[in-house]
Amino acid sequence: MGLNLVWGLLLVVVFFNGCFSKNASVPSRPDIVNIGAILTFDSIIGKVAKIALEAAVENVNSDPAILNGTKLKITIHDSNFSGFASIMEALQFMESESVALIGPQTSVLAHMISHVVNELQVPLLSFTATDPTLSSLQYPFFVRTTHSDLFQMAAIADIVEYYEWRQVVAIYIDDDHGRNGITSLADQLAAKRCKISQKAPIKPEATRADISDVLLQVALLESRVLVVHTYANWGLDILDVAQHLGMMESGYVWITTNWLSTVIDISSPLPLKAINAMQGIITLKSYIQDSEVKRKFTSEWKNLTNLGLSTYSLYAYDTIWILARALDEFFNQGRNVSFSKDLQLNNQSLGGFLNLDSLSIFNGGKMLLENILRVKMNGTTGSTEFTSDKNLVFPAFEVINVIGTGVRRVGYWSNSSHLSKSPPETVNTKLSNSSTSSELLYSVIWPGQTIKKPRGWVFPQNGKQLKIGVPHRVSFEEFVEQVRGTDLYRGYCIDVFTSAINLLPYAVPYKFHSYGDGQTNPSITDLVSYIKAGRFDAAVGDIAIITNRTRMADFTQPFIESGLVVVAPVRRLNSGTWAFLRPFTAKLWCVTGIFFLAVGVVVWILEHRKNDEFRGPPKQQIITTLWFSFSTLFFSHKQNMMSTLGRIVLILWLFVVLIISSSYTASLTSILTVQKLSSPIEGISSLILSKDPIGYQKNSFVRNYLVEELGISEARLVPLGLPEDYEKALKDGPNNGGVAAVVDERPYIELFLSTRCQFSIVGQEFTKNGWGFAFPRDSNLAVDISTAILKLSENGELQRIHDKWLIRGACSSQGAKFAVDRLELKSFKGLFFICGLACFLALFIYLVLIIYQYIKHKPDLPESSGRSLRSGRLQTFISFVDEKEESVKARSKKRIKDASSRRSNGDDSSANDYRSTQRESPSEWSQNVDRS
């Protein structure tokens, strides 16, 4: 490779050695402009590219609309790496000045030559060097006139994601082109939460034996999705060896970059051997929209060669036109072609025959480069324009499936719409993003002539057994238990795992390995960490899926629900002497009593002036009001409502009484008939507030959760090992060296309670999680096991396993109910609010009416001092309110009638007497009221 780089440098020297004039001035529109090209004639791309370049130069020179008579002269050198003699022969071509260089054909040479053109300020245009790193700022004079491999890799990543594969194996040529392309693929896959599980580099110019050695290692891997990124000349050898090794059979997925579509386009028809080696492969091909320019060149191409027309031919053709348009603009700006000495090269003693001191800098190189990047045209490849990062706009590819002797397009990819069935120019981006995955590509015929999507991985056929860690429990062995004296395991978790394994469509060799000392329950978190460390391939057992464990491993679908609960001693509640008070809380009793009194008072106020049943001596009125209030509880009140407002208030109050009495009856019935349990601990909240000791299962995650998440003091926590330890600690209680409650996962507690009726779960489950099996990150086996667990759940097998190992005992059928809730005030706030609002509005309306009547029928007060006048008015108003409404109206009518009679008689004295009667004292008016 080092010798190849030296030869590449010599090629550049050939173009510029002794060819540049020494500060010579030339006309702004020279007759001839020289350009150089470096190709590999022996390659299939080099063959068609040479033809396309020469055709483009001829067409440019024959087009009077461009360059205004200036002709392009291209000198093409063959860089076939054939040896030093071929480099020396190329010196004969370098007898004229060159303003630009086209090529080279490989990214390796492009890297090296870019340093040279940077120094000499000569634009380097390449339609084949697709290495993404060539776009960096390190190579300002490099211009790629095709699409970067970055976009190819993005398309492949979308395909991998679309088919729901998680890992791929990358097979590539181990040079700049291969390594940098695969690095871009890794970045694109990572963005899709996928990855390259294994890289399989092949050395340049590898023999068939070298390729076979690499592919044999690939065949032993788990992933069956293979991405091949190489050169067109060597790619067919890789496929041929793969077919010979049986790697083109069903189950494999082969995805290639556009080198394969190039081979198919140029070399068609291919030999039968090559066709058989590429069946079912997915490859990419640059998408070029049909246009008149393309059709014209396609017709011209058929007259030039028998080789097929590839996209590289079109990009080569357009490269000449891009350069021609940039030169035309260069000359239109008044620029000329001139060169100057490179002082740095003159000061270097690079010696010998290279004559580097004769190399000169192209003075207009920077301006020509700017003009190239500003070119906008419609070429054979469609709209041609450069972005700010020097990439061509609108990168797009066809997704090709090789079938039989031809190919079938199954979809498209573009940088804007991504995968789709429709051409990029017709795809609405928003509609594309909202499409379902089944609509993105047409069906593919995969290797092995199958249309069923390959799973993308298999269990490695290298004879290795999975090393599965199993916790060696000393308690709750119904979940996991090692059969004493053997290396066999049994239990609920073991049965679920083996049943799921049996549903897989492939064999999985595995062996259980005990984890723990057999004296205490092992730490499950430590067991999971062994997977991350590579000591176990999986872990099976009672493994809760919690946050810190998910950072270490991937988990399957949960096979049992879990969560933390509180278990505490309980006692049966007896009905008792005062059981009838228990349905309501004290606050609700008080508020209900207050409303009974308040409604009675409101009804008395509304009815007092109209209803004789609410009148009489004060003692009688108080008794009547109380009797009315509490008799409404049984709807046995005898008083009739005379006022409209009183009827409205009574109707609303009777509705409230109906709801309250019905709720009371239902709650009291429950208290007297349902067996009830009571505990001083009501749940995790009351447990946190108390200072009592709390038990937990030793070596479980419960301790950390209680301390770190709930803030419970570590001094309150008591580790317990066996169910018998749970029972003893709960019976002893916090005052006798025991605990007030035990916090543990629900499956353990349910098993513990199945035979211990004196304890019960109190409060609600305060965390939610589940148990699953742990596997390494991004494990494909974890996905298949999850699917198998879902099948077990659907066909009832999971429930059968549950009943076999975890069936409830005698306590399960008692039907006891824990802590029947008492009815609280908040349950009836709405009713009391509506009733209170109705009473308030009724009183407000009543007061407005009373004031209106008082103003209309009030007596005249005698003239007196201000203080006595105010007290007289208040006394008069109170007496007016207390007076029966019929008496007020009758007296008012009588006064009006008397006044009318006196006016008709015209008796002034009588009129004066009448006025005096109108001014009778408040005491006399009150006496009249009493007599009435």
Image: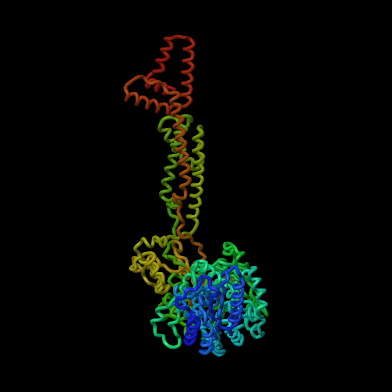
Residue drawn 48% across and 29% down? 610
| Residue 72 position in % (x across, y down) | 56, 75
Q: Position of residue 166 (x, y in %)?
A: 53, 75
Which of 392 and 467 lies nearest the eye of the viewer? 392
Q: Is residue 808 above or below residue 196?
A: above
Is residue 417 positioned above or below 100 on the image? above
**Front residue of this view, candidates 236 and 364:** 364
Tally of marks: 0
Percent from the top left, x then y, of residue 260?
A: 60, 79
Considering the image in quadrants, where does the C terminus appear? top left
Q: Is residue 902 left or right of residue 278?
A: left
The answer to whether 699 appears left or right of 302 in the picture is left
Residue at horizontal 46%, vertical 18%? 895
Q: Where 654 falls versus 697 (above or below)?
A: above
For the residue pair 674 and 183, the one nearer the viewer reads as 183
Residue 11 makes an appearance in the image: yes
Question: What colouring style does the render use?
Answer: rainbow
Q: Is residue 785 visible?
A: no
Looking at the picture, tell me which residue is in the foreground, 218 or 133: 133
Point out residue 344 in the picture as x, y percentages from the top left corner.
Answer: 40, 79
